[in-house]
């Protein structure tokens, strides 16, 4: 019996090793078709296990269908692994790279590799910011992150004004907790800063009870909210989350404490407008979100990567525009019950 277990464990370990080191050609056809007429694009996603990025990935795949072969990699939240994946894709002869960095500060090392191979690179979702200026064949597809913060702030302002009873201690201030995304991620930094700024500009005083990172993650969001609820309980008057995954984690923590039943309520806002958040908005649980348009970001990423893979102008045949940092910025949209269909359409 013991021997059997040992053998089983060895097999399980072997399998894990193979599964982790593999990861490479989820797109499959890549290398076989290298001689065909469709160019091969090397794509990395910082981790497949990210709610929002799973929608972007789907959009990348569907937009590439019939036009490009993809070598699609899960970088498993490991920058060293991503660097190896990029080397591998370059050695397989990809015609362009589409890179969702693990670490937004790691752009220079990817650019170095792309430069050495004279390959164009489209970064997406994690903005390389100033590193873009170091390579003429680098572009970015994402958003203007401060816009999402401002819109989320506006959601808080409008809902707070419409619901005077949310000021539970009646002091005119919002006692809030904030779930932050990955520190150093331009979206997390800008949303944290600009949401609060917008609310203050509207003349509402803010009192921060807690602010910590839950790394964009639902489970971590729930854990933090559990701790904050046991510390502050009903003194918390608003939950502001940098993304919906963390907002949904907070909601499940609140539900376990009896919120959203009877008249026990806690306002929660997020960003992304992913389908699970939309259904909470429909139920009247979540106040609203800000649409982070996964479908269009995936589409723009493929269109640009395909153009440069074929030696065309990066925007040829598209309706995208570049800003002065060679970046396409897909607009955000405030989402409440009133216009929820708009967000549903973006995630179909
Ligand atoms: C999204 C987050 C996501 C992150 C990944 C952000 O733009 O709002 O939900 O986790 O990108 O980089
Ligand atoms: Ca108050």
Image (spheres, rainbow, N blue to C red):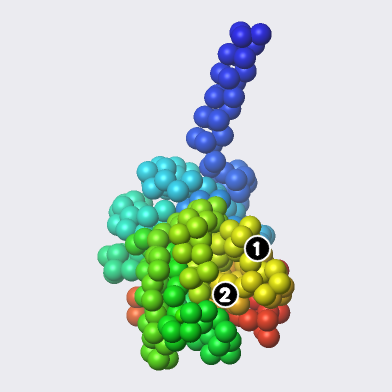
Extreme residue in the front direction: 169
Residue 58's disc is none
Name the residue: 59% across, 62% down.
254
Q: For residue 196, say whether it is visible.
A: yes
Does the residue at mark 2 contact the one at mark 1 (Cβ under 8 Å)? Answer: no
Does 52 sit above or below residue 87?
Answer: below
Give residue 304's position: percent from left, percent from top: 50, 68
**In front of the other: 311 or 1:** 1
Name the residue: 54% across, 41% down.
23
Indicate yes or no: mark 1 CB to ligand 2 under 8 Å.
no
Name the residue: 51% across, 82% down.
167
Does 163 sit above or below residue 287?
Answer: below
**In front of the other: 5 or 130:** 5
Q: Is residue 161 left or right of residue 194?
A: right
Query: Which residue is labeled 2 in the image?
Result: 267
Query: Which residue is labeled 1 in the image?
Result: 258
Quarter of the figure with residue 85: top left
Quarter of the figure with residue 278: bottom right
Give residue 29's position: percent from left, percent from top: 62, 46
Give residue 144's position: percent from left, percent from top: 43, 77
Q: Is residue 327 left or right of residue 13?
A: left
Element at label 1:
loop
Badge 1: few (under 14), some or many (20 or more) residues near its Cα, within 10 Å? few
The CA span between labels 2 and 1 is: 14 Å
Give residue 208's position: percent from left, percent from top: 38, 72
Does 36 sit above or below residue 333?
Answer: above
């Amino acid at each position: 019996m013991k021997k059997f277990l040992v053998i089983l464990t060895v097999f399980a370990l072997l399998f894990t090793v193979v599964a982790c080191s593999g990861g490479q050609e989820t797109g499959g056809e890549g290398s076989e078709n290298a001689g065909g007429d469709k160019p091969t694009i090397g794509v990395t996603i910082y981790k497949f296990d990210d709610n929002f990025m799973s929608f972007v990935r789907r959009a990348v795949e569907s937009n590439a269908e019939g036009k490009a072969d993809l070598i699609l990699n899960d970088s498993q939240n490991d920058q060293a692994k991503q660097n190896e994946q990029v080397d591998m894709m370059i050695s397989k002869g990809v015609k362009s790279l589409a890179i969702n960095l693990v670490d937004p500060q790691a752009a220079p090392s990817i650019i170095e590799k792309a430069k050495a191979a004279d390959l164009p690179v489209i970064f997406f979702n994690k903005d390389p910011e100033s590193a873009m200026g170091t390579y003429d064949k680098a572009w970015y597809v994402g958003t203007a992150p401060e816009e999402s913060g401002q819109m989320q702030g506006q959601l808080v302002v409008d809902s707070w004004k419409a619901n005077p009873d949310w000021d539970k201690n009646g002091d005119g201030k919002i006692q809030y907790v904030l779930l932050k995304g990955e520190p150093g991620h331009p979206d997390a930094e800008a949303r944290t800063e600009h949401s609060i700024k917008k609310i203050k500009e509207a003349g509402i005083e803010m009192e921060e009870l807690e602010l910590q990172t839950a790394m964009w993650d639902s489970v971590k969001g729930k854990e933090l909210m559990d701790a904050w609820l046991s510390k502050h309980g009903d003194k918390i008057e608003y939950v502001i989350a940098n993304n919906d995954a963390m907002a949904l984690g907070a909601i499940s923590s609140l539900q376990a404490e009896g919120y959203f039943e009877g008249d026990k309520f806690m306002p929660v806002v997020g960003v992304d407008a992913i389908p699970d958040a939309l259904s909470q908005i429909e139920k009247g649980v979540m106040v609203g979100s800000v649409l982070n348009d996964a479908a269009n970001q995936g589409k723009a990423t493929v269109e640009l990567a395909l153009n440069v893979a074929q030696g065309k102008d990066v925007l040829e045949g598209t309706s995208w525009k570049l800003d002065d940092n060679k970046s396409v910025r897909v607009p955000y949209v405030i989402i409440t019950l009133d216009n929820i269909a708009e967000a549903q359409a973006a995630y179909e």
